[in-house]
Image: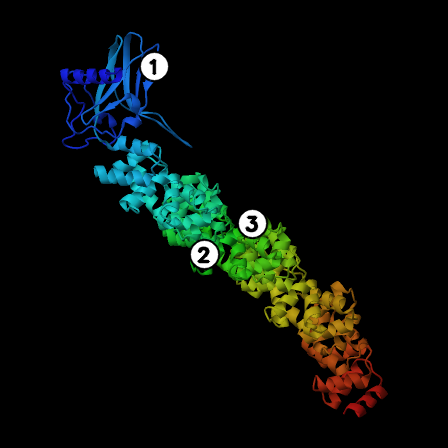
Amino acid sequence: MNAKRILLMIILLIAMIFPLGALAAYEEGVTDPLNPGEALTIANLADAKLVPGTNDTSLPDYLVITAYNSKVSVAVDTAAGIITNQALFLVPISGLAKGTYTLDVALKGVDDGDVHLPPLLLGSTQIKFSGTYVLRISIDAHPAIRSRQLHMDGASSVEIADRLQAEFHLDSLNSAKILQSEAFTCRQIALALKESFLMEDAAAEILTTLGYSAMQIGDSLLNVFGYDATRSAGILKTNFFSCADVGAVLKNVYGLAAGGDAAPILKTVGFTADKIAGTLGTVYGLDAAATAAILKAVEFPVIAISGALRTVFELTALNNAEILRDLLYNASEIGTTLEIVFELGDLDAASVLKSARFKSTEVGQALIAVYEVTDGNLAADILKQVGYLANEVGEALKQVYTLLDEAAAAALKYAGYAVGEIAGALDAVYELGDRAVAAILKGLTYGAEEVAGALLSVYDLSAQSAAETLKYVGYLADEVGAALKTVYTQLANGAAAILKQAGFVAEEVASALKNVYTLGSQAAADILKGIQFAAEEVGRALHDIYNIVESQVAAGILKASGYLAKEVAKALGAVYDEVAAEAAKILRQVGYLANDVGEALEEVYMLVDEAAAAALKYAGYAIGELAGALEHVYQVGKDELAGILKDLSYGVKETYAVIKSLYAIGDQAVVDALKFAGYLAGEISVALKDLVLLGDQAAAALLKGAGFLVNQVADAMKNVYGLLAGDVAKVLKAVNFAAEKVGQALLDIYDVVTGEAAAIILKAAGYLAEEVGQALKDVYHQAAAGAAQILKSVGYLAEEVGEALQQVF
């Protein structure tokens, strides 16, 4: 018997002596397909129990038994060294030095191309070696062991999967796990799942469970299952791969090099905008703008795009808005994102939209659509706070809020725009003229100065035009005056002229001069005169504005301003209700000449000469001034003047002197005038004697020349010159009064009651007998005889007497 047979017999004997023990029982099948150790039973161990007929006798060529310690390691790796039967494997161990060893029972490793697998350990045991040792083991059929066996034989993943399913009824997941443990690729495992288990989409779930990457699974879905990109993406998403993972598959496996090609697929399979944005950024290296463009192209709503940009790229609200604007989203759409994504209020949102270069009208639309800011005032306030100009806000108020001009102006004021800015907006946006704008601004309670400044800056109005506009819309003269002073730097006289030209009356202009320019009454009157206000207008202003209630004071101011007497008279009558005489008196008191006052009395008070003269006298003018005024104004002649003066009770001497001087006439003409006026001969004689210094005869001649009767002359001579009857007869004779006239005067004036006495005086005066005879006849009623006797008695010659009688009787 050879040594080999002896050794085998020894081993069998040992096996009979030592009962078999098992690591696991297989009556209930494989309990852990991934644990090949459960298939190994080492009979050398105490209490090991073998299950007859379960030993997998196909394994000897695949087994490797290794004995080792810290010093040595010996492998029994060929079937020649192993004795096989249905119950167990006997593995003789020899050639070892005495000592304690560990025995590892394993299937051989795989070294095939890119696959390098270490031995598949089934189990280990400790032995003490003293010269020989037989390891007794039983290995049940096991999926993991079979997989290694088939792998070493060069079987494909499909073949192995088929065998595992057929032999062990192993499910797809465990089969895949075993294939994975055997270093089959994801693609190979996928093929096995497809071919052996007829799996489709569910294969990805198993591959995912095995821990394969999306890239590996995607590769399998394309190259094993032939799925298109969309289906693969959906499967990967279903298996909870991230959008970035799926995007990487689309790019690297499916060759979708452009993010724009991948994004529609990612959206189709249900990834959100922010996930896709992250993928476009990390996988495709796109910036925020490019990403946003793609998200818009695949029709994500703007809110989703905005949220994605914020989340992925950490953009500020402004950067976000700028990108969306470049993608032609309108302000309202972007405003919605600012409210929802960035949680901005209306003011902050408006600020962002402005910084993003949206027009005021667009921002206004956003305020309405997103923030429900429907009140124009509030909208204007917001738009101003974010920096829009008044014109821009006005445009929004007109186009978006459909406000009319007045309401828009009110909103601009509410927002705090300056009056000039509001005016500019009304001009530029509503195309209003200066007057319409001024009216609106006044309605908003802006002062005239503010409005004037606005009119100057916007319409470049001259001071005159501005004043007219301000008056047109209802500003008072004081207000307009203040505007002219402050805005146009007008001095008082210039402002007054402008106010007058604008249609303000004198009182209003005076009010401005007083209250705005702080001028006194005289200075104001001077200016009002200079701009050609009538005296009565200025007088009214003095009365009403300067409270000058004394007419004389007003008249003095008017005179000092250069008004004519007749102009001042109008003021005195119209404003102060002064009658003619009082007006004349006032005019004299303030220094007007009688001639000027006379003109006033005629033209203003419509007085005739007599009434004017009376007024002038009442006023205190001297007779000469009065007379001169009557001659100058009324062109009265000397006779009329004398009568007027007489009626005014002026003395004859005053009258005489005035008439003689005024008309430059001789004494006879003066006496004629005085007589015409009704002065008595005696009165005139007084003037002739005292004023002209005439003698009795010269005076008598003038009186006779004026037509005074002999008695009147005689009386004057008697009473004024103190002449006796004889002297007066001589004077009367000298001035050519007839004897009978003188006789009558002697009788009437001197009480010469007898013819004889009269004849004596007449003869002494130089009258002829016949003249005296005539006087005796006519005055003393003497008959011829009586007359002859008297004539003879007074010394006339007989022939003179006879001649007289013949002539007279």
At x 29% / y 41%, what residue is drawn? 205
- Residue receiving disc 1: 73
Residue 82 image point, x, y percent: 27, 22
Q: In the picture shown, does residue 408 fall above or below 779?
A: above
C-alpha gap between disc 2 and disc 1: 96 Å
SS at circle 3 = loop
Q: Nearer the viewer, mark 1 or mark 3?
A: 1
- Residue receiving disc 2: 397
Which image quarter holds the N terminus?
Answer: top left
- Could you tell me the amino acid type at mark 1? Ser
* Crowd tier of the residue under label 3, counting other residues whose Cα lies within 10 Å: few below 14, some 14–19, many 20 or above: many
Residue 675 image point, x, y percent: 70, 74
- Could you tell me the amino acid type at mark 2? Leu
- Residue receiving disc 3: 516
Residue 20 visible in the displayed image: yes
Residue 377 visible in the displayed image: no
* Crowd tier of the residue under label 1, counting other residues whose Cα lies within 10 Å: few below 14, some 14–19, many 20 or above: few
Q: Nearer the viewer, mark 2 or mark 1?
A: 1
Sequence-wise first label, 1 or 3? 1
| Number of numbered callouts drawn | 3
C-alpha gap between disc 1 and disc 3: 123 Å
